[in-house]
Image (cartoon, grey):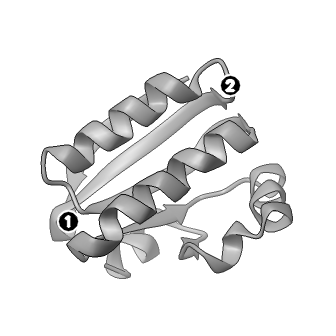
Amino acid sequence: MEILETKIDNNVLLLAFKGRLDANSSNAAQDQVLAAIDRGEIRLLADLARLEYISSAGLRIFMMAAKRLKPLGGKVVLCSLSEPIKEIFEIAGFVSLFPIHPERDEAVKSF
């Protein structure tokens, strides 16, 4: 699992996930995402185009980030989900909890 961080338009932190987000990689990924919030990032855009798999441990990271950002007036937006990843978010009921956009540019504008 790899997460590349890039600061982009509208003071948004792009988190580009690559690989498998599962029990083996979720602790390190969680630490990286929460560290970004701790240093003041409140607009997180998770680009999941290169995410191959996500487990419930991976889904929990997005929920934790959203809960931490809510009192700060921030949010997590998701984009570029492949069909298998989108299906996992749908089954888990997460599509109603997070703004999800098909393209990165559209997601950036949603902030």
Sooner in the amino-acid sequence: mark 1 or mark 2: 1
- The answer to whether residue 55 is left or right of residue 68 is right
Give the residue displayed 51% in from the left and 25% down from the top: 27
Give the residue displayed 64% in from the left and 49% down from the top: 59
Percent x, y of residue 64: 47, 53
Outermost residue to the top: 24
Q: Nearer the viewer, mark 1 or mark 2?
A: 2
**Quadrant in the rendering for residue 72:** bottom left
Which residue position is annotated with label 2? 23
Q: Are marks 1 and 2 in contact (CB under 8 Å)?
A: no
Circle 2 residues within 10 Å: few <14, some 14–19, many ≥20? few
Inter-mark Cα distance, 1 to 2 = 32 Å
* Secondary element at tag 2: loop
Q: In front: 107, or 29? A: 29
- The answer to whether residue 70 is left or right of residue 89 is left
Circle 1 residues within 10 Å: few <14, some 14–19, many ≥20? few
Percent x, y of residue 55: 75, 39
Q: Which mark is residue 9?
A: 1
Vertical comparison of 110 with 55: above or below: below
* Secondary element at tag 1: helix
Give the residue displayed 69% in from the left and 29% down from the top: 22
Q: In front: 87, or 73? A: 73
Give the residue displayed 57% in from the left and 29% down from the top: 26
Vertical comparison of 1 with 111: above or below: above
Percent x, y of residue 45: 39, 59
Task: Quadrant for the C terminus, please.
Answer: bottom left
Amino acid type for the residue under numbered disc 2: Ala
- The answer to whether residue 1 is left or right of residue 46 is right
Q: In front: 64, or 101? A: 64
**Quadrant in the rendering for residue 5:** top left
**Quadrant in the rendering for residue 58:** top right
Amino acid type for the residue under numbered disc 1: Asp
